[in-house]
Amino acid sequence: MPEEKLKPEEILDISYTPPQKDWIKPDVKFKKGSFGYAAQGKHLKYLDLPNPRDWRPQEDDWQLPEDWENIIVKGIKERLGKNRAFQLFLDVCVRCGACADKCHFFIGSGDPKNMPVMRTELLRSVYRKNFTMAGKILGKLAGARDLSVDVIKEWYYYFYQCTECRRCSVFCPYGIDTCEITMMGRELLSLIGINANWVTEPVANCFRTGNHLGVPPHAFKTSIDSALEDIEDVTGIKVDAPINKKGAEILFITPSADYFALPHWYTLMGYLMLFHEIGLDYTWSAYASEGGNFGFFQSAEMAKRLNAKIYAEAKRLGVKWILGGECGHMWRVIHQYMDTYNGPADFMEEPVSPITGTKFENARSTKMVHICEFTADLIHNNKLKLDPSRNDKWRLTFHDSCNTSRGMGLLEEPRYVINNTCNNFFEMPDNTIRERTFCCGSGAGLGSDENMEMRLRGGFPRANAVRYVHEEHGVNLLSCICAIDRATLPPLLEYWVPEVQVSGVHELVGNALVMKGEKERTTDLRGEPLNGKEGQEDV
Amino acid sequence: MDLGQAISQKKAAILGKWFRLIMDTYPLDASGFLGREKDRFANPVGYTISREIEVLYDELLQDMDSEKLAASLDSIIRIRSVQDYPPSEAVSFVFLLKKAIREELGDDISDNQAYADLLAFEARIDKLALLALDIYTKCREKIHQIRLNEVKTETERAFRLLEITRRMHDVPDAEEHPGDGENLSP
C-alpha cells in the first residue's frame, strides 16, 4: 500500500464524517508517523530468523515466503496446543466491551481497531475460520475471515499499536490478557519474516554485545567510570564500581539506557552512590549488561534467550542473588515468565539484604529483587541518612510503569522511597495511576522516532493527567521506574506539557542521600544549583 | 432579529449540535464513547473538545480575545494534529459551527432576512479558522522538531560510542593531529 496520492477530482473532497467501514474487511493505510520501520534483513540473519530481507511496510510487496499462509495456520495450531491461555482468550470473550474504552491508543485516536476487543478480533477471526466449526461453515456470519496479505498487513499495523501494557485486562471480567494476544500475533508475524526494526535490532545487539544499544564491554566500563567522575564532582567522594567481580554477593542488572542515555544517567549515579554508601558487596557484568528484554516484544523464545544470559552470568560470577534496577518489562519477564523460561535459579540463595537482614521471600524463586524494594527496606530500617530538602526544586508526581504496577504489583515501594526523599509529592487522579495507570504509549517496541505521531496519540491520556497535576499543583517533574519511560516520556511531555521534566526514582535518592565524608553539595546530580546555593556551583 | 442575541440564547442547542458534528468526524464506533464519557481522564479527547468549544463560542459572541481563542484552539488542534486526519479535516471542526448555527437558526434567519448579520458572524468564524491554520502548522512543526531531536540524540549516542572506541584503540583525534584525517581517508 504505497503512500496515497490524491486524484484531481478528490482534492476538494473534504470529508466531515469518515466513511462507515466493515471491520471484517482489512483496510490499513501506512501513513508516515504512525508505524515503525521493518526489521532489516541483516538483523534477522544474525538471529537466525526466517525470511531475512529488506522491505518497507508502505510498499505493496512485502516479499512474503511462498507458503506463508500454511506457516501462519500451522503457527496458530502449534501455539493453541502449547499455550492454553491463548486458546482460552480466543474462545472465552463475550464481546461485553468492558475493555473497549480502556486502551490509551483508542482513547487517544478514536480508531475502533484499537479497542482491545477489536484488536483481538483481527486474529480471532482467522482462528474462527481455520479452527472452529461455526467459522468454517458460517464464515463472516460467525465473525470468521480468510487469511489474506491485507490481513497480515493489518496485523502488523495494529499489533505494533499495542504496547502490551495490560490496562484492558484489569477491566476484563474474564481476565483476558490482550497483551498475550499481541505477543502471539507478533510471534506469528515473525514466522514469515515480519518484524519491527525497533525490536529486532536491539535484540540482535543484545546477542552480540550483551545490551540493546550495542555497547561493547570496554565502552560499558568507560561509561560507568564517567558516571563515577560525575559523582566525585558533585560529592567529592571517589566511588568504586566493580565489574565482572567473581564471588561478589550480589549481581546488579539494569537497562543499558541507564548508563548511556539522559535522564537515565542521573538514576545511574543514584544507584552507584547508594551502593557505595551502604558498602554493598556487588558487581556489574559487562556481558549481562542489559536488564531490558526486547526479545519479549518479539517472541517467547527470544525473550527466553535474552533472559538466560542474566542467569548464566550470575552462575559464572558465583553471586548469591541478583538486584535489578529501574526497568519495566525486565520485571514482567522476571516476575511472570522467568521461572518457566529458565528457572528455577536454584544455584543461588534466597535473597537477604546484607544491610538489614530482611528476607525477600517474594523473590525466593527468581532470586531477583527490585531496587525499590531494596531501598525502601533500607529506609524503613533507618539505614540511610536522607535530606529531602535537596529535592525541593521538584514538585513531583509518580508515573506507575505498566509492567511494575500491573505486572508485579510494585505500587507502594517507589512511593515510600519518594516520600522519604522529597517534600513535594502529588498523586495524579485515581483512575490514571496504580493498576489503572496509563501507558507512556511507546513501550513494547513502539518507541522509534518514525512512529512519533502514534506515540503522541497513545501517550495523550498519560500526558493529560500530568497536565492536570501541573495546573493544579505546579508539578514540574514526572518520576518513574522504567527506562523506556525515561526515554519516551520526555518527548511526549515536550509536546503536551513542556513544563514538566522526567526522572528516575534513584536520582531523587542520590540527591537526598547524605554520604559519609561528602563535601557540601551545591548542585544536584544534574549539575544544577541546589535551592539556596545558586551561584556556588562553580566554587 | 438580533442574531448575536439569538446565538447567545440558543447556546445550549447550538453548542450541543456543534459538539455532535465534531464527534461525527470520528469513526462511528468511537464517536459514541467520545461524546458520552464525561470523565476528563477516561476521555480526554471528548472532554477537551467539549470544554474548549464553549470558550470559543463565548469569545465569538464577545470580544474575540485572541489569547483565549488561541489557547482553546491549541487544546483541540494539538489533539487533532496527531490523530489520523489530513490538515483540512484536522481544522474542519471550526467550520462545523456554521453548519450548527444554520441548522438551529436557519428558519429564524430566513424569516427575519438576517443574512447581513449572519455574514458578519461567519466572518468571525473565518478568522477563527485562519488562526486554527496557524496553530495546526505550529503543532506539526513541533512534532517534526521532537522527531528531529530524537534522531539527534541517537546520533550523539553513536558518536559517543565511536569516541570511546577511538580512545580505546588510540586512534588520533583529528583536532589534536590536524592532517591525520587526510591519511585516514580512503
Image (cartoon, rainbow, N blue to C red):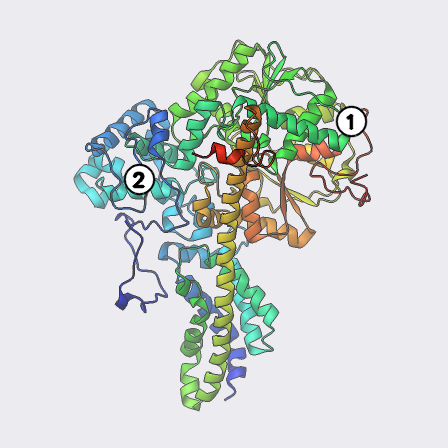
Q: Secondary structure at mark 1?
A: loop
Q: Is residue B15 left or right of residue A412?
A: left
Give x and y (percent) for residue A2.
Answer: 29, 50
Residue type marked 2: Trp
Chain designation of label 2: A
Asked if residue A376 shows in the view, the reply is no
Give x and y (percent) for residue A502.
Answer: 62, 42
Could you tell me how far apart the alpha carbons at marks 1 and 2 are, in whole angstroms? 54 Å
Chain designation of label 1: A
Q: Is residue A76 left or right of residue A445?
A: left
Query: Dot 2, how many residues are within 10 Å of its Cα: few (below 14), some (14-19), or many (20+)?
Result: some
* Residue shown at the point (56%, 32%) measured from the top left: B163
**Tag shown at residue A515:** 1
Q: Quadrant of residue B26?
A: bottom left
Residue type marked 1: Met
Q: Secondary structure at mark 2?
A: loop
* Residue shown at the point (43%, 72%) measured from the top left: B95
Asked if residue A24 shows in the view, the reply is yes
Q: Are the residues tagged 1 and 2 within 8 Å (C-beta)?
A: no
The residue singled out by tag 2 in the image is A55
Query: Dot 1, how many residues are within 10 Å of its Cα: few (below 14), some (14-19), or many (20+)?
Result: some
* Residue shown at the point (67%, 30%) measured from the top left: A269
Give x and y (percent) for residue A273.
Answer: 71, 26
* Residue shown at the point (46%, 84%) measured from the top left: B119
Mark toward the start of the polypeptide (1 vs 2): 2
Answer above or below: position of A152 versus A85: below
Q: Quadrant of residue A82?
A: top left
